[in-house]
Every structure is written in structure tokens, then in C-alpha cells.
Image (cartoon, coloured by chain):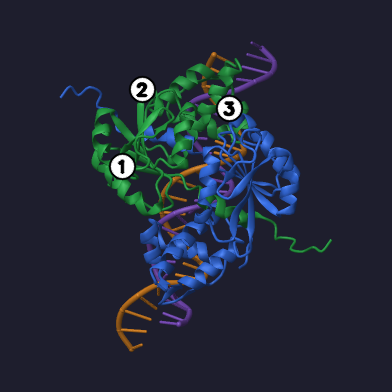
Chain colours: A green, B blue, C orange, D purple
Amino acid sequence: VKKTNISEAVVRRLPIYLRVLNYLVQMHIETISSQELGERLDLNPAQIRKDLAYFGEFGKKGIGYDVDYLIQKIRQILKLDAPVNVALVGAGHLGHALSNYNMYLNDNMRIVALFDALPAKIGQWVGGIRVQPMDELPGTVQKQDIRIGIITVPATEAQGVADRFVEAGVEAILNFAPIVIRVPEDVRVHYADFTAELLSLPYYLEKKSKETGC
Amino acid sequence: VKKTNISEAVVRRLPIYLRVLNYLVQMHIETISSQELGERLDLNPAQIRKDLAYFGEFGKKGIGYDVDYLIQKIRQILKLDAPVNVALVGAGHLGHALSNYNMYLNDNMRIVALFDALPAKIGQWVGGIRVQPMDELPGTVQKQDIRIGIITVPATEAQGVADRFVEAGVEAILNFAPIVIRVPEDVRVHYADFTAELLSLPYYLEKKSKETGC
DNA sequence: TAGATTGTTAATCGATTAACAATC
DNA sequence: TAGATTGTTAATCGATTAACAATC
């Protein structure tokens, strides 16, 4: 499991591979070729082989990849082979949704703490976790060894929350607020910007048949 | 507003531009250069100019872009200058969250219908919309001129919902389920896959200081 | 006029795909 | 051995960035 300068695009595909592989385990499929994997994911087989080859020689020529072994390897690469604790700020509907997605995540990755600034939310139980006030964030991050933060607050609050995460020592952030946040360069930020995704869809609609007066 | 073979990356950035421009209007800023826009969005100014130039000459040399005019033009390009009705299937937490995001969307883009397969959900009111049973989907899509569908159901149900959308005549889909869905090639599918986004984050964490026994 | 900034071409950079020798 | 499939190099494709003439 070597690393050097692996492109973001490659790393982003690894969880996708992992997902299909986990499905294959359930189906009792023990071996898979890049060809088949590509068909399932609408990806070019060469791309899959190349992605995996950045990290080692995981396949067998003439055979393909052993599903269990590949899962194990990808989990190692993504550092999902040890517990990864996540905190989430913003216990609104989106926060609730994500907390309930815990089961969809890897066994080792878990949202273990929820925070909100609104007094009305504090003390509520969401997916088995009690919503805490913001001033408990630093202590909890430390105590629970939390290294990743999720932001699901309104855009106006997002930068402030990011600052609190950074102060508390969080090393990576997934931001759902539709705004660019500024953090020190050693903190990794990913964006989950679905309003942008949604607003770009109409571009691809055929020009509307307005009042075709049928 | 010409079009030909504009790259997806370009189209995906347009809503981002729109968002900042809307913010600038609120700030009573009337003109902006690609330089300033780039600083606000962490993007290269040349890229912004090039993106916009695909669709026309919207700027003034020596001056920059008129904020109001550019908003108007981008809305035209994205076809957000006329009402775009959206239906959502899956009235869980994520569905709730998205319905409440209605205000964040463009004035013209609106989630106008909600569906769920579970009898318990049907008839509930979410963000001013009544949850309908699945068999009302085709009729409602037709009646309300819905052209875009959002899928927020579990992965196991996603393909089925996609099929229903396609049968009903929906032309574009935003899929939140962590699975590849198959649709006719004239139907556009975007993915909002935040579990993948989240699972790739640990890769970027520094190797953990496990038990530094301080 | 002088300064600023666009639109656009050319250069660079990076990512995807094709092709194939190696080998299970 | 014959067939299949990997790992990897080379070719292609596409996207980003730099540079600058045009011009407000």
C-alpha cells in the first residue's frame, strides 16, 4: 500500500469500488475482473486496473481480483481499517438523515457526536446520539478522538463552525453548506453541494414544448 | 446564449457563479471582475472568463461583469429563467431536508410533489406539500409539468423509482441512493453521493498518532 | 491617455483509454 | 496448452492555466 501523489479522482473512486465489492460478498461472488466491475459501475476496465495498480498488485493475471482480499486492501488504503470517529454540527433534517446513514457507512466510520447552536435542539436524541451544545465541542472532539467533522448548518454559520472544528483539532471536513470555507491548508475540505448539482440539471432538458396546444 | 459541446465541468460551475452573484446583489455590488470572483470561489480567473465566454461576451473590457446582467444570462443558460418543477420520491429525513431547501434553490426551481411507498408516510405534510402514494406519480408528473425527479430512497429501491420516473416522462434525475441507476440515454442522471465523499476523507488524514502515551 | 480587464489563443497539465507483453 | 486477465506503457483526449492583443 504505497502512496505518493495519487489524484483525487482516483481516491474518490475507491469507496465506489468498495461498495460494489461489499455487495458481491453478499452475493457470494468470490472473484471479479476489472471488466465485470466496469460494467457494474459504468467505468472503463483499464481505469479500474490503473486505479488499483497505484497502490499495489492486487489481482491475478488470467483470474481477476479476489473480492475479500481487494476489500481488505482498499479499506487499508482509505484508512478505514481502524475506527474513524466523526462529529456533525447542525441537527436539522439533513443532520438527522446523515446520522441515520451510519449503517451505510463502513463499520469503522461512525458519526459519534452531534452538535447544534440552538438551545431547543440540545438534549434531543438522534439516532442514539444526544445533541450537545457547541461549547462541548472541543472537549468531545478530544475525548472521542474525532478527526473528521461534518457541517450541515446554514451557509451563514458554516465558516464559524469550520473555525470551531479547526480549533478543536479536526483534520478533515465535509461541508454541506453552499459556501466556500477557509481553513488552514493542512485541513482537508470536501464539498457536498447538491443544490449546485440540482440547479445544473435543467441545462440538459430539451427546450420545453411550451404550450404545444395539443 | 449559444451552445454546442460544453463540458460538464463548465456547466457544473455555473450554479456556483450564480450563488456568489446573488450574494453580491445583496451586498449592493454592481460589478465584478473575474479576478475578484476567482478569489471568492478559489478558482482561476482565466477559467471563469473561459467558462462564460463559451456562451457569449458578457463582460466589459477594463470593467468586468455587470452583476445583474450576468445573473440574468446564467439563468438563461441554465434554463432557470422559466419555472422548473421537481418531484421527489422518498419522504425520509433526506427528503424532508431537501424539501426545506426549496428556499435555497432558484425562485423558478421548486420541489412541487413528494411521493413515498410507505402507507404510513402518505398524507403527511412536508414543507407545505402532501406526501402522495406512488401510483399517483404519473398523473402528478403530467399535471404539474414535472421534468426533474429526485431519488432519496434506499439503494434497493432506487432503480425501481428511476424506472417509474422514466415511464412518467421525467427527463433528468438527481439520485442520492448509493447505486448506479440505468436509464435511457436521453435521460440525464446526476449523482449526489455523499457517503463516497465521506469515506474518501480518512485517506487524507495523517497517519494516526495512536496512543502517543503522552 | 493610462490602467484595468476581457475574450481567446497557445501552452501546460492531468486524466482517461487503448494496446499488449507478461503470466496465471 | 489455450484462454483470460492483469499491470503498465503509450496514445489520446480533455480540462486548466498562462499570456496577450483588443478595448473599455
Q: Amino acid at mark 3?
A: Ser
Residue B18 located left or right of residue B78: left
The answer to whether one can see residue A64 in this image is: no
Q: Amino acid at mark 2?
A: Ala
The answer to whether one can see residue A87 in this image is: yes
The residue indicated by pointer 1 is: A187
For marks 2 and 1 on the same chain, the one whose residue lies earlier in the sequence? 2
Q: Name the quadrant containing residue A79.
A: top left
For marks 1 and 3 on the same chain, the one whose residue lies earlier in the sequence? 3
Q: Secondary structure at mark 2?
A: loop
Q: Amino acid at mark 1?
A: Val
Foreground label between 1 and 3: 1
Q: Is residue C24 above or below residue A136?
A: above
- Tell me the subunit letter for badge 1: A
- Residue B59 image offset from top left, x and y in percent: 48, 73
Foreground label between 2 and 3: 2
- Residue A189 image offset from top left, x and y in percent: 37, 44
